Image (cartoon, rainbow, N blue to C red):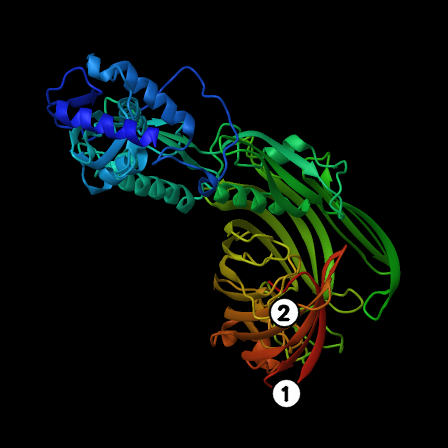
Amino acid sequence: MRAYYVAILTLAALTNADLTHQAIANTNPEPIARPDAPDYVVPVTTATPQPTVVISPPEAQQNPQFAGNTGASKTNTTAARQNVKPTVPSSGANRTDLVVMASDVQVVGANQELEQVVLKTIKTKAGGGTSQSQLQDDVDAILTTGLFADARVSSNSNNTGVKAVFEVKPLVVRSLQLSGAQVLTPAIANNIFKSQLGSNISPAALNQAVQQINKWYADNGYALAQVLVLRPNPDGVVTLDVAEGVVGDVNIRFLDKDGKPTKGRTKEDFLTSQLKVKPGQVFRVETARQDLQQLYQTGLVEKADVALNGDSRKVAVSYDVVERPARSVNAGGGYSEDSGLFATASYKDQNVGGEGKQVAANVQMSGSDLQFDGKFANPYRASEPDRLGYTINAFRRRELSQTFNEDVNLPNGSQAREGRIGGGIAFNRPVGDWQGEVGLNYTRTTIRDRNGKISTTDESGNSLSYSGTGIDDKVAVTAGITRDKRDNPFNPSQGSVASLSTEQTIPVGNGNILMNKVQANYSQYVPVGILNNSNKENKEVLAFNVQGGTTLGNLPPYEAFNLGGQNSVRGYGTGEVASARSYVLASAEYRFPLLNPVGGVLFADFGSDLGSSDTVPGQPGVVRDKPGSGFGYGAGLRVNSPLGILRADLGFSNQGESKLQFGIGQRF
């Protein structure tokens, strides 16, 4: 009852005195003229590094208005108070801080958006109590938002209490500063914020601009980059502080097949030299994906992933690598109708010295023949851009001819064998997004019977070589380019690979062969989810391949394009579709998982000689009644083994025949 009586006396005193009190936040009450705002962005440069802090995702932050942290608001308040200090007129009536009812609260000088900001910020509410100190605190809180250049309040007493009128001057955005930006350029930021420059500040518009910048980062693959905070100051300069995920350390971690750390055989600096992600760069998803492709293309990696450790300001990038078995030694023997008893030995090392150098040698000995194949390769290194990669090889091989099959034999009834001896050297290096290669090769080809005797014609009198002697020499300059965008060159699940090659012979030696052979090849891999498969190691994929080629000039018959077989049109035997001067081949596969590590394949192949078989000297395809075009379809199994992918396909041809065919690696 006593408190109620005191309140009545206080209200009566205020009414009779008809006092007006003002709390102001600007010593100069004159209105400030607004100059034209410059339409440009000023990038921030500073010699003092900003402290690194852990940044949570934007959706987890508690932001006053549009600021990124509460520390920014405190800084704004301090700056505002340094320039504009709230003062209160000194009078006897003001020395007693009496609490009275606020009958009405109004905001003038602001649009509806900023008016709501003021009403949510102040503690003085219509129908509630207030005091002179509370009104001062309200003015201070308004300035703390960073949205206003000036704020003041007038309190007019009436019969029901006090009417509080808050008069504010919204901050005019005059320029934008960037802090912590590398990839976000002033031009991009200016374009996004240009609607705000020269206008009264708008929290909604600034928040929308922040969202647009975060979207720009995401759309351009900067997965870690984000806006941390917007800080306006009393001069109308808005500082945009961003963290872009700058790369710190880049490491290689070797893992075994169970995912446990192990010691790798490959030199870490060799692998890091293949990477595009470097310390000091802004982390980008596409660059990391290209690095994974490059690691696979070294032929040393069975599995690779990227691990990130850090925050949005600075991140350490680790490439987790499972190495492929690099070294193998094999020995064996057997018996074949062609060679009789034979013994074989092979050695392969794909990682000599831990630097990706390759050595391979194969030898087969029998009572009547010695065959070998040797190769040494030293790959191109991005860390040594002036040094070319190179490959040297030498060989001596003999095999049953795919062109001159058993339908027409040699005069003595034996099936023709093609023997080749020679060697070459090729140099390689990247050309933009392509891998380029040029080389020089020599090959001597002989056509022989089972006993190794040279044969010049078949039993129908058709010539088997271009020189007519059964022995041809070919010296050729080769060139090719390849663009490989596959996620894994051994078992791709997405991406593409395209290649174009040419071989130009020099007319020297037996036959004086002058020809040019051109081939093009393209494959596309599309991941699908028909079976809702969750197996990351064996995915569902639609795979497509189309290829073609032609030969200009002198064409030895054994150099014809042979269609049909496990690597061509399945369901046909090797070379049974055509032996052609020109060809086109198209294939489609649906690859799907079964039980790990086994997968299944449905396939269809089509090949055509484009009517060119009769232009091959000796017409080997025509005289053997090869159809010239063929279609095959079927199903197969794929087994992911330590030796690579083992392939078994059961194919059916459009002529009603079927064949079970085996191979290593995917068909394409």
Left or right? Give the position of 369 relative to 393: right
Q: For residue 307, say whether it is visible.
A: yes
Residue 190 quadrant: top left
Image location of residue 299, percent across then percent down: 66, 46
Q: Is residue 368 above or below residue 403?
A: above
Q: Image quadrant for the N terminus?
A: top left
Outermost residue toward the bottom?
656
Mark number displayed over residue 637 = none
Position of 143 with respect to 181 (left or right) is left
In the foreground, 214 or 635: 214
Whichever of labels 1 and 2 marks the residue nearer the N terminus, that label is 2
Q: Quadrant of residue 90?
A: top left
Which element type, helix, strand or loop, lies under badge 1?
A: loop
- Residue 376 seen in render: no
- Residue type marked 2: Leu
Above or below, 464 relative to 125: below
Of the 4 image quadrants, the one containing the C terminus is bottom right
Residue for badge 1:
656
The residue that mark 2 highlights is 464
